[in-house]
Amino acid sequence: MTGTPSPLVAAVDLGGTKTAGAIVTGAGGLLARAECPTAADGDAEAVFAGVARVLDELSGHPAWPGVAAVGVGSAGPVDTVAGAVSPVNIPSWRGFPLVRRIAERTGRPVRLLGDGVALAEAEHWLGAAAGYRDALCMVVSTGVGGGLVLDGRVHPGPSGNAGHIGHLSVRWDGDPCPCGSRGCLEGLASGPAIVRHARTAGWRPAGAGPPTAVAVADAARTGDGAALAAFDLAARALAAAIAGTAALVEIQAVVIGGGVARSGPLLFDPLARHLTRYTGLPFTRGLHLHPARLGPNAGLVGAAAAALRELPPPS
C-alpha cells in the first residue's frame, strides 16, 4: 500500500535586510532555500521584485508542483484580514497587498503572519518553546518583533500583530520612532540601534569594515567599552519590555532569535541580570530564557507551519 505523500508548502520570510524562501515538508524540513537582499529603501515594486525573485527560484525546483500553499512571515505590522503589510522598516510598503500579489504569482493560497508570530509558530512546534504553554518568542534583528504562545497555542490576535513587542515604549520621553510613538524597544535593542548607540559612545568599526551589529559584537568580545555598553543598553530595554509582558499575560519562558541574538552571552548575560531587576512581582519571576533553536530558518519554518495547518485534511 502506498502511503499518503507528505504535504509540501512554500514559505517566505520577509525582513528589512533580506527576503528568504523555502519549500518545506510537513515535518518542517527544508527541501530548497533561496534568499536575496530586501530593497528596503526602494519603491514598492523594487521591494516586491525581491519576493518575486525568491519565488521564481523556488518554482524551478522539481518539488514545486507538489506545493499546496504559501506561508508568509513579514516584518510588521501586518493586516491578516486585508492580506496587506506595512513594515515599519520598509517605508514604501504601506498597506501593500502582499497576499494578493503572491497568490497571483504562484497560483497558490497564501497565509500571512507577522515575523514574530512566525517565530512563535516555529519555536512552539519544533524549538525552544515546545515544552511551554505560555511563552514570548522574539526576533531581535534589523527590527524587533514578537509572538505569544498562550494556553498552548500561538495567539496572533485579530489582525495578526499580537505580541509586537518591538513597539512597546520603554522610554516614554525617548526618541521618536517611525511608528509614531516614542522610546520604542526597537529603537534601543535592534541591530541598527546597537550600532547607533555604540558609535555615539565612541566605537568605530575596525579597518574598512561596515558598522554592523556583528562588528559591534566582535569589538565587545575584545572588551571595547562602548560596544559593551551598547549591548547592555539593548539588554536593559529588552528586560523592561519582557517584564511588562510577563506582568500582563503571565508567561513561563522567553525565546529570542534573530541576528542580534546570535551574539550569545553578550546579549543573554546582561539580559538575565537586568530581568532580575525588572521582574519584581512574584508571578513574573523565574522566567526561563532561551535562545531560539531554529536559527535563520525559524521564520520560514513558522510561516510553513501556519500554511500547513490551513491545508484540507488528506482524503
Image (tube, rainbow, N blue to C red):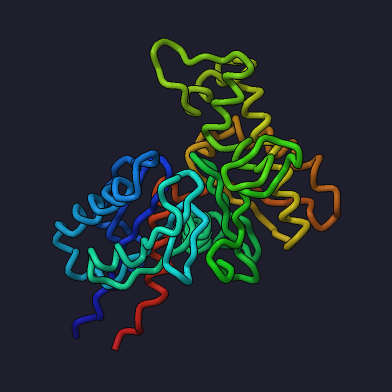
Please give the name of the residue rendered at 50% of the width and 28% of the height, measured from the top-left corner: 213
Residue 165 seen in the figure: yes
- Residue 164 falls in image quadrant: bottom right
User: Is residue 289 found left or right of 74 in the rendered image?
Assistant: right
Q: How many marks?
A: 0
Q: In the rendered view, tell whether residue 139 sits above or below residue 68.
A: above
Q: Quadrant of residue 110?
A: bottom left
User: What is the quadrant of the C terminus in the image?
Assistant: bottom left
Percent x, y for residue 91? 45, 45
Q: Residue at x 23, y 63 (%)?
A: 105
Identify the residue at image location x=70%, y=39%. Answer: 272
Q: Say whether residue 126 is left or right of residue 243.
A: left
* Picture coordinates of residue 26, whole percent (x, y): 34, 69
The residue most toward the top is 207
| Residue 297 drawn above or below residue 302 | above
Quadrant in the picture for the N terminus: bottom left
Residue 280 in percent (x, y) is at 85, 48
